[in-house]
Image: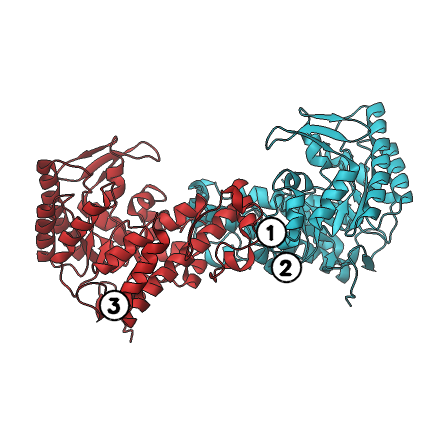
Chain colours: A cyan, B red
Amino acid sequence: MEQMLKSKEMRFELFHGSEGPRRGRIQLMRGAIETPVFMPVGTRATVKAMTTDEVRDIGYRIILANTFHLDLRPTSERIRDLGGLHQFMHWEHPILTDSGGYQVFSLSELRKITEEGVKFLSPVDGSHVTLTPERSVEIQQNLGSDIIMAFDECIPYPCEEPRCRESTERTIRWEERCLRQWERGESGVLFGIVQGGGNAGLRRWSTRRTVELDFPGYAIGGLSVGEPKDVMKAMLEASVEDLPVDKPRYMMGVGTPIDIVNAVEMGVDLFDCVMPTRNARNGRAYTWQGEVNIRNARHADDAAPLSETCACPACAHYSRAYLRHLHLSNEILGARLMTWHNLFFYHELMEECRQAIEDGSWDGFAARVRATFKT
Amino acid sequence: MEQMLKSKEMRFELFHGSEGPRRGRIQLMRGAIETPVFMPVGTRATVKAMTTDEVRDIGYRIILANTFHLDLRPTSERIRDLGGLHQFMHWEHPILTDSGGYQVFSLSELRKITEEGVKFLSPVDGSHVTLTPERSVEIQQNLGSDIIMAFDECIPYPCEEPRCRESTERTIRWEERCLRQWERGESGVLFGIVQGGGNAGLRRWSTRRTVELDFPGYAIGGLSVGEPKDVMKAMLEASVEDLPVDKPRYMMGVGTPIDIVNAVEMGVDLFDCVMPTRNARNGRAYTWQGEVNIRNARHADDAAPLSETCACPACAHYSRAYLRHLHLSNEILGARLMTWHNLFFYHELMEECRQAIEDGSWDGFAARVRATFKT
């Protein structure tokens, strides 16, 4: 049963599983989230091509927004003064915000890292901007985020051990500073982030030190940055191993249906990724019959929907031929319908994950997903 | 009361007005349309940024689609084989298709006009295409259009009298060929188009000759092509004067709220224009308080909706500050919400037109629209 929580409070219950796939519920002031869960990405205060009502109607109860983009434009102070991000984008359920770390580090040409934080040139207007752990938390509290991510350094892959160690240690110091800043603010729950790059020893060290800081939840960062799949798996294992069972675990920026199923199997609870939305705009749909590239000429005369077994609005009313026509004509409705379908699919994927854990039918379910998306 | 009609049948009733603004109803196989009416433009089988369900929920019961664009891609034969345009785009109400004439003539660099028709290079793949009156009607019947427009030549403004006369006379011959082709097909109602350029004498001649061909409805073509407002008004008057009172009149490609009110006042019943949808994507909104340019910096911190008196979804949930942010970020949702609002406004504009005619309060209503959008 849901209970009234304050903004800085979170409750996590685990119903099924301690090792392996686990079924739980995160409760926050703005509502409950059934885990494992996928969070659609709403970078600039919009899940691209969708209204928040449509996102909610699919069944989503948490979305992600990007600190970095929103502070550059329209700025977090502006959003705060307009009543916060929930009001701004018309979304009453929980929002998780990233720390801006990942975006800053992707601006490799433009940035300079010091102990204090990161200096970079704004891609919006070229001005000098400094992002520090304190400022990152302040921005996220300006936005009114429900789950605030600690400011970390995302280590590229591959990375030499000394640089990897230096960065991993600095992230711990930054996380301590985030905690102190968070305590000064009024809102949100602060999650720590495990780093350590592609080095299993540093991963374990980072996990241990991050857990000592005692966050209500932990993210596994720095994966899905171009490393081979077996490295991703090994690093995820090294990260998860020493995380407390009774706290939620969030694997950032992942991923394909198979990536998600693999990570759920290792005990991960939360996911976010641009794949369903970005691939939709590029004409790629996920279905229980496999991936569909709508650009393909064989769909030109196809009166069938993307998937005969899908209950999304795109599949209810529109043919592959129509979706292909819209995509080739660069029509907004094409991006809308494809996005709608893919978010519907990802929501269903997570529902089936949760059901399979509850039913004890995980192995069969996971095998089905792996067979469907085997490439 | 609606009565079951066959595909080639149309009924037009006039409730109020014989001279000046008039209130009527067009009945077609796929449903009734209250006039005066505005038809949203769905060029490539989509009203840009909208689902057909959203267009219907606003209250629209007829939309326009473009013969020229759809025959180039995905081709009218493909749409026919997929069950027709209504099925293709999931729209069960009437569709009016233009003849392709206007689009072809806008390709002035690429076309060659003969008595037979127009040859041009496809902007999609550079191939040679010939559009004739027969082919235009065939395409529109392939699409399953409810109201088919005769293939005409749109005369540029200004135009010398001999060229204007030659073209106006040829359009009459093309309309006769359209009629013969239409009789061979199974579906749709064929409207004639009055031309004559900016020449009042040729306008009257064109009207008289077109009416002799006895169409169930008449369009006034070749206006809103860059001519001064007083020329548009004079040509509209010259065209409407000799049109039969008991047939619907359609002013093609018009226009602003003031243009529409002016034309309704002269007895026009149907309108289409890309303005509400195109301007929406360019950040311009229509409201009962006047036009709003959402790019303007003064909206950056404005928590108010586009219009306090508007009941559209954009105004119900979103601030000007948010709409401006979406627009500057080039987000699809910005185009969606602005389009939704503008189509909602245009629908309300036409509802108020109809109400004002019924109530006998036309003059006050028209004055209000003119005052609101005076520039």
Distance between the Cα atoms at labels 3 and 1? Answer: 44 Å
Q: Are marks 3 and 1 in contact (CB under 8 Å)?
A: no
Distance between the Cα atoms at labels 3 and 2? Answer: 44 Å
Residue A16, x across and y down, in percent: 81, 59
- SS for tag 2? loop
Residue beneath label 3, please? B24
Which residue is at the front of the view, B80 or B221? Answer: B221
Q: Are marks 2 and 1 in contact (CB under 8 Å)?
A: no
Q: Is there any visible trace of residue A261 in the rendered image?
A: no
Chain letter of disc 1? A
Chain letter of disc 2? A
- SS for tag 3? strand
Q: Is residue A21 left or right of residue A302?
A: right
Q: Is there any visible trace of residue A155 in the rendered image?
A: yes
Location of residue A26 with respect to B48 vertically, above or below: below
Type of amino acid at the residue the image marks with label 1: Leu
Chain letter of disc 3? B
Residue at 17 percent of width and 64 percent of height? B19
Asked if badge 3 and badge 2 are on a common chain, one would say no
Residue A238, x across and y down, in percent: 85, 39
Type of amino acid at the residue the image marks with label 3: Gly
Q: Which mark is residue A271?
A: none
Structural crowding at the residue carrying mark 1, measured as other residues with C-alpha within 10 Å and reported as few (<14), some (14–19) or many (≥20): many
Structural crowding at the residue carrying mark 2, measured as other residues with C-alpha within 10 Å and reported as few (<14), some (14–19) or many (≥20): some
Residue A85, x across and y down, in percent: 65, 51
In what quadrant of the picture does the N terminus of chain B appear? Answer: bottom left
Residue B36, x across and y down, in percent: 28, 62
Residue beneath label 2, please? A59
Among numbered discs 2 and 1, the one appearing first in the sequence? 2
Judged from this view, the residue extending furthest toward the bottom is: B1
Type of amino acid at the residue the image marks with label 2: Gly
Residue beneath label 1, please? A343
